[in-house]
Structure formats: structure tokens, C-alpha cells
Image (cartoon, rainbow, N blue to C red):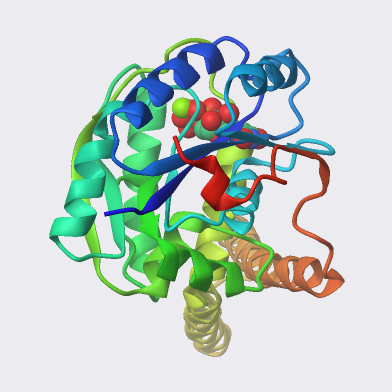
Amino acid sequence: MNKSLSVIVPCFNEEEVIVESYRRLQLVLSTLQLKSEIIFINDGSTDNTESILTGFLKSDKTVKIISFSRNFGHQKAVTAGLNNCSSDMALIIDADLQDPPELIPEMIETLEKSNAQVVYCVRKTRKGEGIFKKISAKLFYRTLNFFSEVRLPVDTGDFRLIDRTIIDEFNKLNEKGKYIRGLISWVGFKQVPFYYEREARFAGETKYPFAKMLKLATTSLLYFSTKPLRVATTLGFISVVIALGLAIWSILGKIIGYTHADSGWTSLFVLIIFFGGVQLLTIGIVGAYIGNLFDEIKNRPEYIIRKKENFEIKNDERSK
Ligand code: UDP
Ligand code: MG
């Protein structure tokens, strides 16, 4: 079997881990009976990541580097990797060694044995992550599945092995808001799970602060479902029913005389904040979709590449 593999590693300020990641990756790749390359995407790092990566190039022809003009985010970095890979298979892996590179041979074997196009890694456990991250992640994947119109495997990240069919289909997708694990699921074909223990980050801090997590969560929700819009309609409907009931109750009360005009401050107050809340929530949901439409129609590029290194070498010259 003479297949080729591109390993896609997004890096944002990973100076503390990148040398070790590269060492472990290279060690694993050298045992494989196939052509391989590592594509590092330097997502606008402001530390020494770039110079460390460039250092790898000196001794290793199989390393390629894409440097962005600024930080565009993890999903864009992976997208750039997939857009620029020409191998038969691509493996997406984080730079921080939370996803052990040593699993790669077994993943390739699984892909081939099960005749699948995707091997997606499912986290059995998550080591070294705070209780907030664990609970929010669990809740997130399940909420997303409730809303989503495509079945999205729970507890999976982007750590996965995909073959050329999937890479090509992915590269045809035009949307700018990318939730990669969801899109790969959406593409279909045969996808098989691979269970593993997620390790703790090797060194350094998470590059996914709460704001970035929230952005990923909203992208996934809004791009994979229009159910939130229906939730807005349902909420509107419920509030109209409540309002009608209360209107009838208060008018009858006035005629028959079981309510007094001067009492009822509390109920008025509660009603105003309730309906105000429903309206704001509904406008917010609609606004979120409009915001995404706006982003999409602007049709800006998803990322801007400042520098590509070592891409001029052709595939066949890159053998081990
Ligand atoms: N990353 C990136 N751009 C960003 C944020 C993260 O390329 O804006 C990379 C990061 O270097 C790492 C991967 O995405 O390789 C996952 O990030 P991290 O490990 O910090 O996320 P966590 O595992 O904490 O969710
Ligand atoms: Mg991590």
C-alpha cells in the first residue's frame, strides 16, 4: 500500500509544546509504511512558535508551514490545512498532545479494515480539564444534537483521520462559518468511531478561552439547525396564549368585579418583564441568524495566508 498522509497541526502560541509534539509525531510517522508530511498552520502566533517551526524545516523536508496574517482561529487553521493538503489521507490533531500521536497507526488500520472514509476519535475520558470544561462540553454536545438536523457524534473533537473523498467534499463547501467536526459528519460516507483517553495538555495554557468556546458553540448551533427559530416562534405563541388568557381574565374581572384596578402591581411587573424577555430573546435568535447571513454574504476570505513554506515540493519527491 503506497498511500500518503498529511498530518494537520493548528498552532496558536504553542512554543511550549511544539518541539515535543513534533518529536512524538515524527517518531510515529517514521514507523509507518507510507509517505507522510506534517502541515503546521501557524495561526497568527505572537510567541516563538513561528521560528521554532521554521527550525524544523532545516532538517526535515516533510514539514510544511502555513502562516496566517493574524489569528483567525482553530477552525480556520484546520480548514487551511485541508485546503492545502494533497495526500490521500489527512489526520487532524491538536498541537498540545492531548490527542496522542501514537494512536495514528491504529487509526489508519481502522480506516482500512472497516473500509471507512472517516475515523473519528471519541473521548472516553478527559484528563487535566477543569470541571467547568467537562460539564459544559458534555452539555454542549447533547444540546447541539437536540437542535441539529444532522446526527453529530457526541464527545468528539476534530481529532480524526479522513480520506481523500472527504477532503475533496469538504473543500467544496462554500460556507465561511465552519464547524469542522459537524461538516465532516454531514458529508456522510462511512464513518467509524475510535475510542481513546484524552490526555492533559502537555504544557502551556488552553488557547480556547470561554469567548472562543462560545463562538464555536453558536456557529455549530446556528449552522446546523433552524430549530432555534422555531423555538422563538413557539415562545411567541406561548406568550400570546398567556396574554390572551390574562386579557380575558382581567376584562371579565373588571365587568364582574373580582379584580380591583388599584391592586395588581406585582402581576403587571411580572408580565412586563416576561413579555419583554420573550421579545428580546426572539429578536436575539433572529439577529444571530441575520448576523451569520451578513458574514456569509460579505464573502470575505476565511483566512489570509502571509507565508507558505516548503509547498513547492511535489508529492512524489516527498517520500521518506
Ligand atoms: N488553536 C489555533 N488557533 C486558535 C486557538 C487554538 O490554531 O485561535 C489551536 C491550538 O494551538 C491547538 C488546538 O487549536 O493546537 C486546540 O486548542 P487548545 O488545545 O488550546 O484547546 P482545548 O484543547 O483547550 O479545547
Ligand atoms: Mg487542547
Residue depicted at x 39% and y 19%: 24
Q: Position of residue 238 (x, y in %)?
A: 47, 79
Image: 1 above or below 34: below
Give whichever of 292, 81 is nearer the camera.
Answer: 81
Q: Is residue 97 left or right of residue 153?
A: right
Residue depicted at x 36% and y 54%: 3
Residue 33 lies in what quarter of the image?
top left
Quadrant (top left, top right, bottom left, bottom right) of the C terminus: top left
Extreme residue toward the left, this view: 113
Q: Position of residue 93 (x, y in %)?
A: 44, 37
Give whichever of 91, 38 is nearer the camera.
Answer: 38
Extreme residue toward the front, this view: 317
Image: 182 above or below 94: below
Residue 11 lies in what quarter of the image?
top right
Q: Does the rendering let one see residue 263?
A: no
Q: Is residue 93 left or right of residue 267?
A: left
Q: Position of residue 210 (x, y in %)?
A: 58, 33
Q: Does the rendering let one see residue 271?
A: yes
Quadrant where ligand 1 appears: top right
Image: 123 above or below 200: below
Residue 91 lies in what quarter of the image?
top left
Q: Position of residue 1 (x, y in %)?
A: 26, 54
Image: 233 above or below 221: below
Give whichever of 268, 4 is nearer the camera.
Answer: 4
Q: How many marks?
A: 0
